[in-house]
Structure formats: C-alpha cells, structure tokens
Image: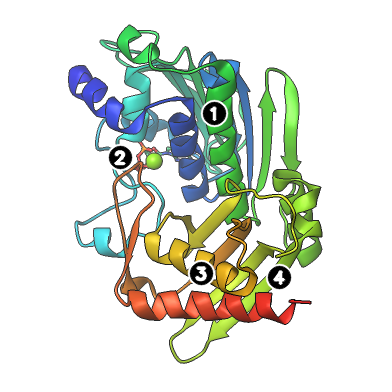
C-alpha cells in the first residue's frame, strides 16, 4: 500500500506548493474561518498549518491518512454534486508517504485533542493525546526525505516559496470570508483578517497584490439576468503603465481557472479599447449555473469547459468592454 501511495504521491505532491494547496483545501472543506500557515525553507523543511475547522474525531484520525479514506463522498452519485474542493481521499496518504507528517485535531465534542504521526513508508500511525484547540493542525516535515529522485527536481528555496505563496494568494482571493496568515522562516508575510465589506476586501487585495493594483483598478460588477451570468471583481485601469501579466486571477464559481475562452474575451476587450497590446492585471469572479460548466477533476489542472462557450465569451467581452470604454479619455 505504501508503494501505491508513493506512486500516487507523484500525481498530487510535486512540490511544497502542492502540499499547501491540498492542506488549505482540506481546511476550507472543514469550514475553517481562520488558517495559519508557517513554512521553513520554501516549505521543504517544514509546512505547518493550523485551522479552526470542524476537526477530525479521534477514531477517524488514522483513517484520514489512509488511501481513499474520504469523508466527503458517501455514494458515487455525489461526484456529480460534490461541492467540496478535494474529494479523492488521497492527499494526506500521498503526503505522508513522502514526508514526516503529524496530524493533530480536536472536534467540538472532544475534551482533548489527539495526534497521529507517520514517517514515510512502512509505518503504522500511532495515536497520542495532544494539546490543541478545536480544529486541526498538520505538520509536514522534510518533504521527499525518502525519495531523493523527487527531491532533486525541487528548485531553489526562493522559487519553491514563490510557488507556495501563489497558492496561498489564490485561495485568499477566492475566500475573502476566511482569515489567512503566512509566515516564512520566522517572518510574517500576511495577516489577513476575514474581509466582508468592500473596504476590507480592497485592503486584502492591496496586501496580496500590492497597493498599485488598486490605484489603477476598475471595479467590475455586471449581471445578465436572463442567462444568470455574473462577472465581478477588479481590473487594472487601461492607463496603467506597467504590464503585469502574472497578476491575472480568474475564478469560476469560486475556483481559479485558466481558460482559452476566458483569456481571449478579456484580452480582446482590453485590446479593442486600447489597441496597445498590453496585458491587464485582474481579479475577476465569474458565476454561472454549475450545471453549465464542467470542472476538470484532475488534481493539478485548473481547466473548465463551458457548455455555452460562445455565450460566456460574449458576456465577458461585453461586460469588460463597456467598463473600459466608459473610462476612455
Ligand atoms: P479528501 O480531502 O479528498 O477527502 P484528504 O486525504 O485530503 O482526502 O483528507 C482525508 C480526510 O481527512 C478528509 O476527507 C477529511 O475527512 C479529513 N481531513 C483532512 N484535513 C482536514 C482538516 N483540516 N479538517 C478536518 N478534516 C480534515
Ligand atoms: Mg483533500
């Protein structure tokens, strides 16, 4: 079973950033409203996450580390309707096969917390009492300590941390209602309180993307009543002198995606007003009937397929074009 885990780990666990993505998604699935993350050496040496979610009951702790142990799907039909971010039941098992993992948790019903730890292959998880408030902590140490071949593919600490930080940014942008903090090598990079008002949201945007993003941003909020489409968020002003192709965040029903139809619509709208070939920066949220979009369930891809891609393209194009054109001098 450990060998199977290590093979599967290659699919999910590519680098520290992929560990963090899985852990953060688990915390969000557990209803956490606050997630604190502490990493060392780009996440290779240590990733420590703490959340205030529903927790894991004592009797389920060891189970959570076993393959295909998901609490999120009861019957196969649920796959269609699943709304949780992770539902394959293999992330923790995969991570624990290539790192030293400690899982500590307390449910609201329990008066004390419990902890299990696993170090790579051939180890049965052992249950220990622990001190912990309600919620869950996951500690992942020495990633790939037992798989040197994979460790070789890791890049510099700086690069690994950049990937990791990007994962945190994306999730922090997709869930304004949740508080996040991030610490690297003892230094606090973000402390984001839950952001509910527009002002608080913009504050979070500045913290994550830099103050200049908002100085030059247009607020977008467009709805098509008939088709049930909605586009909201921020887009950098056409007068923005700096080109920032990397600050492009597009969420479909709360999930970050990269999509040709979307990219084309955005670029075209921008181009048709400005004719300057510059890439805009944006944080956009697109909502539509989930039944009209296929989300690729591959763990590491962010792809979608719109059933009515023409309609989607034209709506995004027209919404953005109108806002940008209104501001043309
Ligand atoms: P999946 O998320 O696909 O179910 P994982 O391996 O990521 O599989 O997690 C296994 C199980 O462990 C989850 O189904 C969930 O029950 C539990 N779990 C993991 N992380 C947390 C967390 N932060 N809070 C509560 N439960 C968790
Ligand atoms: Mg998961």
Q: Residue at x 45, y 30 (%)?
A: 19
Q: Name the side, left or right, on which 16 lies relative to 322.
A: left
What residue is disc 4 on? 219
Outermost residue to the front = 275
Coordinates of residue 162 in the picture (x, y in percent): 58, 30
Q: Give the SS element for disc 4.
A: strand
What is the CA distance from the residue labelled 2 to the residue labelled 1? Answer: 22 Å
Mark 3: give few (<14), some (14-19) or many (20+) Cα within 10 Å.
some
> Is label 2's Cβ within 8 Å of ligand 1?
yes
**Of residues 217 and 83, which is closer to you in this image?**
217
Looking at the image, is mark 4 or mark 2 earlier in the sequence?
2
Q: Please give left or right for residue 81 compared with residue 247 in the image.
A: left
Q: Which residue is mark 2?
A: 89
Label 4, ligand 1: CB separation under 8 Å = no
Where does the image place residue 35, in percent across and percent down from the top left?
Answer: 62, 40
Q: Quadrant of the N terminus?
A: top left
Q: Which of the 4 quarters of the picture holds residue 118?
A: top left
Q: Residue at x 38, y 17 (%)?
A: 153
- Say which residue label 3 marks: 268
């Amino acid at each position: 079973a450990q060998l199977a885990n290590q093979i599967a780990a290659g699919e999910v666990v590519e680098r520290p950033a992929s560990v963090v993505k899985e852990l953060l998604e688990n915390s969000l699935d557990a209803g956490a409203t606050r997630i604190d993350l502490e990493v060392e050496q780009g996440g290779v040496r240590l990733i420590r996450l703490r959340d205030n979610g529903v927790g894991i009951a004592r009797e389920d702790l060891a189970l959570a580390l076993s393959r295909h142990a998901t609490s999120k799907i009861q019957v196969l039909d649920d796959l269609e309707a699943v709304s949780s971010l992770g539902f394959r039941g293999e992330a923790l098992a995969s991570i624990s096969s290539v790192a030293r993992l400690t899982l500590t948790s307390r449910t609201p019903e329990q008066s004390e917390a419990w902890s299990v730890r696993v170090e790579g292959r051939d180890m049965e998880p052992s249950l220990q009492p622990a001190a912990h408030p309600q919620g869950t902590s996951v500690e992942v140490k020495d990633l790939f300590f037992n798989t040197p071949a994979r460790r070789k593919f890791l890049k510099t600490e700086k690069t690994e941390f950049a990937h990791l930080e990007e994962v945190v940014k994306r999730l922090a942008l997709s869930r304004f209602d949740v508080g996040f903090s991030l610490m690297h090598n003892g230094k606090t990079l973000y402390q984001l309180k839950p952001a509910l008002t527009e002002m608080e949201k913009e504050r979070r945007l500045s913290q994550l993307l830099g103050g200049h993003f908002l100085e030059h941003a247009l607020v977008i909020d467009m709805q098509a009543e008939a088709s049930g489409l909605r586009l909201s968020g921020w887009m950098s002003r056409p007068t923005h002198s700096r080109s920032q192709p990397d600050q492009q965040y597009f969420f479909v029903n709360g999930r970050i995606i990269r999509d040709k139809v979307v990219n084309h619509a955005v670029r075209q709208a921008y181009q048709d007003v400005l004719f300057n070939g510059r890439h805009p920066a944006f944080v956009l949220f697109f909502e539509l009937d989930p039944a009209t979009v296929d989300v690729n369930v591959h763990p590491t891809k962010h792809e979608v397929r719109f059933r009515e891609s023409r309609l989607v393209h034209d709506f995004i194009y027209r919404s953005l074009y109108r806002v940008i054109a209104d501001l043309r001098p």
